Image (cartoon, rainbow, N blue to C red):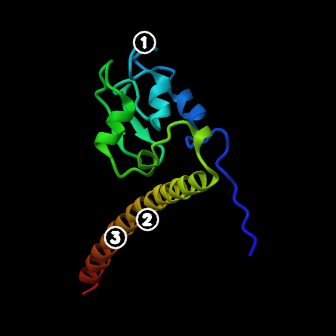
């Protein structure tokens, strides 16, 4: 059996360089422990906005953290808040140090996370559609009951 595996593209948050690009409005500078490079190396990318500029998520476990202080160590915070994260358990922040097996294992977990996010979005859409249909059916049933009473 021949399986072709296509790794995430260069713009994927799987790669540190892409995570690093999300820190363009990061409120801390390079002299702080939680600078953009250290944050990206610890597996984080920015998901915050103007109201929460320091909200980040892990590219593998999706752990979200905010409330960063200048001297917080991103790797230590990741370990503390989710020691079971596969990226934390690998304990290799430099992707150049990953073996092919480690890369493949992380890729599988990353892909599963991505699929689960898509499935959860689809479930939300379906639940909304079901609620809309229930509402429409309820309105139709009431309308039919009124019509039946008026013909009786």
Q: Residues within 10 Å of mark 2 (few under 14, many from 20)?
A: few
Q: Is residue 3 above or below residue 25?
A: below
In this rendering, the label closer to the viewer, 2 or 1: 1
SS at badge 2: helix
Mark number displayed over residue 31 = 1
Say which quadrant the C terminus sits in.
bottom left
SS at badge 1: loop
Say which quadrant the N terminus sits in.
bottom right
In this rendering, the label closer to the viewer, 3 or 2: 2
Say whether residue 119 is left or right of residue 3: left
Q: Position of residue 109 (x, y in %)?
A: 50, 57
Residue shown at 49% from the left, 33% from the top: 41
SS at badge 3: helix
Q: Residue furthest bottom?
A: 152
Residue shown at 40% from the left, 31% from the top: 48
In this rendering, the label closer to the viewer, 3 or 1: 1
Q: Position of residue 14 (x, y in %)?
A: 56, 43
Q: Position of residue 36 (x, y in %)?
A: 47, 23
Q: Which residue is mark 2?
A: 126
Counting the numbered discs, the total is: 3
Mark number displayed over residue 134 = 3
In whole angstroms, how far apart are the C-alphas of marks 2 and 1?
47 Å
In whole angstroms, how far apart are the C-alphas of marks 3 and 2?
12 Å
Q: Earlier in the sequence, mark 3 or mark 1?
A: 1
Q: Earlier in the sequence, mark 3 or mark 2?
A: 2
Q: Position of residue 67 (x, y in %)?
A: 28, 28
């Amino acid at each position: 059996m021949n399986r072709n595996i296509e790794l995430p593209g260069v713009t994927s948050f799987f790669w540190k360089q892409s995570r690093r690009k999300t820190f363009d409005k990061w409120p801390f500078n390079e002299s702080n422990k939680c600078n953009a490079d250290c944050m990206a190396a610890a597996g984080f990318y920015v998901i915050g906005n103007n109201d929460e500029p320091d909200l980040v998520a892990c590219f593998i476990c999706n752990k979200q953290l905010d409330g960063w202080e200048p001297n917080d160590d991103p790797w230590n915070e990741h370990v503390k808040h989710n020691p079971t994260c596969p990226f934390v358990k690998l304990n290799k922040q430099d992707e150049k140090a990953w073996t092919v097996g480690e890369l493949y294992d992380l890729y599988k977990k990353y892909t599963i996370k991505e699929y689960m996010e898509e499935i959860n979005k689809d479930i939300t859409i379906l639940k909304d559609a079901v609620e809309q249909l229930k509402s429409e059916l309820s309105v139709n049933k009431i309308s039919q009951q009124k019509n039946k009473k008026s013909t009786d």
